[in-house]
Amino acid sequence: MEGIRDTLRKKQVVASRLANGLDGGNIKPMARVTLFYDADCGFCQASVDWLVKKGRPGTFETVAYQDEERLNRYPMVDRTMADKGIQ
């Protein structure tokens, strides 16, 4: 029984170190993710808020579909396709 506890404890320590970025540099941090969403949609806003809250700080950049200035920073986003996706 003691062997199982030791193994579980070691796994917990490793998981904790990974979650806190203390992995000795073996795992690269995840790239920043850009989330495009409809700010007029309550479900969309709640989903984005939940993701940002659950993710590591700095993981998500949120861009409201209605924010023309910020949306213009992403010329690869086809506005016609985005319009269809929002409907």
Image (cartoon, rainbow, N blue to C red):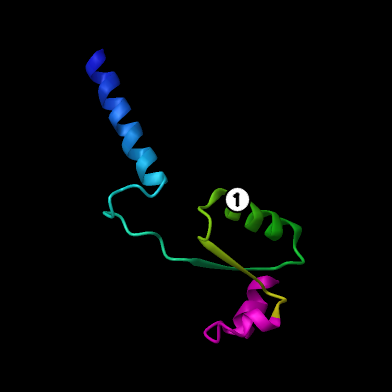
State the residue at coordinates (54%, 62%).
Answer: 60
Which quadrant holds the C terminus?
bottom right
Q: Residue furthest left?
A: 3
- The quadrant holding residue 6 is top left
State the residue at coordinates (75%, 58%).
Answer: 42
Q: Position of residue 68 (x, y in %)?
A: 69, 82
Residue that mark 1 sits on: 53
Tell me the amino acid under the disc marked 1: Lys
Which quadrant holds the N terminus?
top left
Depth order, front residue of 66/20: 20
- The quadrant holding residue 74 is bottom right
Q: Secondary structure at mark 1?
A: helix
Question: Could you classify mark 1 by the number of other residues whose Cα lies within 10 Å: few (under 14), some (14-19), or many (20 or more)?
Answer: few
Q: Position of residue 67 (x, y in %)?
A: 70, 77
Q: Is residue 24 above or below residue 4?
A: below
Depth order, front residue of 7/17: 17
Q: Is residue 56 above or below residue 66?
A: above
Boundaries of the magenta span: 68-87
